[in-house]
Image (spheres, rainbow, N blue to C red):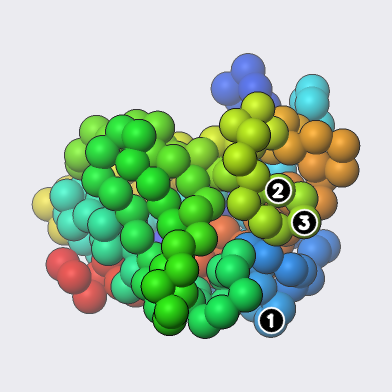
Amino acid sequence: MTSHTGTTEDPTGTTEPTGDTAGAGTAGLAGSDGTAGLDGTRASTETGAPEGSVVRIELTVDAPAGTAFDVFTTGMDTWWPRSHHLGAGPLAEVVVEPRVGGRLYGREDDGTPCPWGRVLAWDRPAHFAFSWDISLNWQHQPDHALTSRVDVTFTPVDDTHTTVTLVHSGLDQHGDGWETMRDSVASPGGWPMIHDDYARAAAAAA
């Protein structure tokens, strides 16, 4: 069984229980269906300064840590929603290059690459981090000063279960209006929905 926990996170490291966010499906990552997680989980945002600049989600998947890491990274194409794509054409494949400095990008049916991130940490099977190189109008953001960061950690519970924690931080770095990005990734159609799809893929690969 996959379990989910959302928390609000303060930059000082304290956490508090999640409350529901009000956002429905939005453009970009959140998609258009506004579907909540399998158990109704919604991500919540931190309190503190800058307010709401961190979104955190935690879940336990039915897979060992190595499998959980591989499915989240090089296996991202098996679970990433095809509706969550920056390009104009249909998304054919999601690619994660398995090294620090590698790219995260979508490849359209005609072969056009659509970059949206860079690998910042690659420590299999414990830690994967990448930049969120997406602008507020849901286009590739080439200015790294205007991007945020996603850290994903994989903590073994036992030989067949892993707790996966995703922390999307620095959302205020997207500039004026950054709250719209926060609301989108924390909405039911954002990281909560994506994590349900990921959990199914991890269990299937175990």
Name the residue nearer the viewer: 129 or 24. Answer: 129
Identify the disc placed on residue 137: 3
The answer to whether residue 53 is seen in the rendering is no
**Quadrant in the rendering for residue 62:** bottom left
The relative height of residue 93 versus residue 115 in the rendered view (above or below) is below
- Answer left or right for 53 relative to 178: left
Query: Residues under labels 2 and 3: Cα distance?
Result: 5 Å
Task: Report the residue at 73% width, 37% height from top.
Answer: 174
Task: Report the residue at 21% width, 60% height from top.
Answer: 63
Name the residue nearer the viewer: 18 or 114. Answer: 114
Kindly identify the amino acid type of the residue bearing the numbered disc 3: Asn
Q: Residue furthest top?
A: 12
Mark 1 / mark 3, whichever is N-terminal: 1
Task: Report the residue at 22% width, 75% height from top.
Answer: 204
Q: Residue furthest left?
A: 159
Identify the disc placed on residue 33: 1
Q: Secondary structure at mark 2?
A: loop
Q: Are marks 2 and 3 in contact (CB under 8 Å)?
A: yes
Q: Secondary structure at mark 3?
A: loop
Kindly identify the amino acid type of the residue bearing the numbered disc 1: Asp
**Quadrant in the rendering for residue 43:** bottom right
Q: Secondary structure at mark 1?
A: loop
- Quadrant of the snapshot with the C terminus: bottom left
Identify the disc placed on residue 160: none
Q: Classify 10 Å Cα crowding around label 2: few (below 14), some (14-19), many (20 and above).
A: some
Residue 18: % across, % down: 67, 49
Query: Residues under labels 1 and 3: Cα distance?
Result: 19 Å
Q: Which residue is mark 2?
A: 135
Kindly identify the amino acid type of the residue bearing the numbered disc 2: Ser
Q: Are marks 1 and 3 in contact (CB under 8 Å)?
A: no
Task: Report the residue at 40% width, 73% height from top.
Answer: 111
